[in-house]
Image: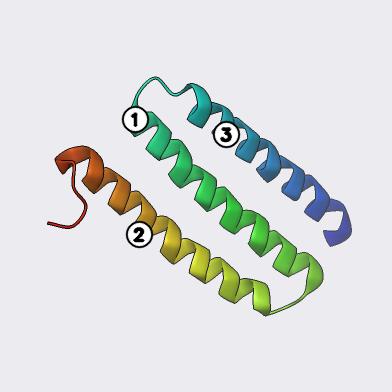
């Protein structure tokens, strides 16, 4: 059953990533693009976790944690840049 569901789930998340890339390309405002980038990082974490389940390796879990931390810091930095124009004051 798991061998049937995993490719479908990975395909759905990859489709969501493609739609996020489309939103990043045509987003009318900068906050829309930042939100699409944040959602793209979350979808990347989902793909890594699905690959972890499919391959049964613990290494991918650590990679997903690092991606989560980097995605959060990147989103906060971009929001701070939009609000004040400077990241480090």
Question: Which of the 4 image quadrants contains residue 33?
Answer: top left
How many numbered tags mark residues here?
A: 3
Q: Disc 1 on helix, strand or loop?
A: helix
Depth check: give the residue in front, 71 or 55.
71
**Category of crowding for the residue at label 2, using alpha-carbon neighbours closer than 10 angstroms: few (below 14), some (14–19), many (at least 20):** few
Left-right relation of 36 to 57: left
| 78 relative to 49, above or below | above
Is 2 or 83 nearer to us in this picture?
83
Quadrant hosting residue 88: bottom left
Instruction: From the image, tell me which residue sits under label 3.
Output: 21
Residue 4 drawn above or below residue 57: above
The residue under label 2 is: 73
Residue at the image point whose x is 57% and y is 58% from the top: 45
Could you tell me which residue is drawn at 49 percent across and 21 percent down? 26
Q: Neighbour class for label 3 at 10 Å: few (<14), some, many (≥20)?
A: some
CA distance for labels 3 and 1: 14 Å
Q: Which residue is mark 1?
A: 30
Q: What is the quadrant of the N terminus in the image?
A: bottom right
Q: Is residue 87 above or below residue 81?
A: below
User: Where does residue 46 sit, x and y in percent of width and height?
Assistant: 61, 55
Q: Secondary structure at mark 2?
A: helix
Residue at 59 percent across and 70 percent down: it is: 63
């Amino acid at each position: 059953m798991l061998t049937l569901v995993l490719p479908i789930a990975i395909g759905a998340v990859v489709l969501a990533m493609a739609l996020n890339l489309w939103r990043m390309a045509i987003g009318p405002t900068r906050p829309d693009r930042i939100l699409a980038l944040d959602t793209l990082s979350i979808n990347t974490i989902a793909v890594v976790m699905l690959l972890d389940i499919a391959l049964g390796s613990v290494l991918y879990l650590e990679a997903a944690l690092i991606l989560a931390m980097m995605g959060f810091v990147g989103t906060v930095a971009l929001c701070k840049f939009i609000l004040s124009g400077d990241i480090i004051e």
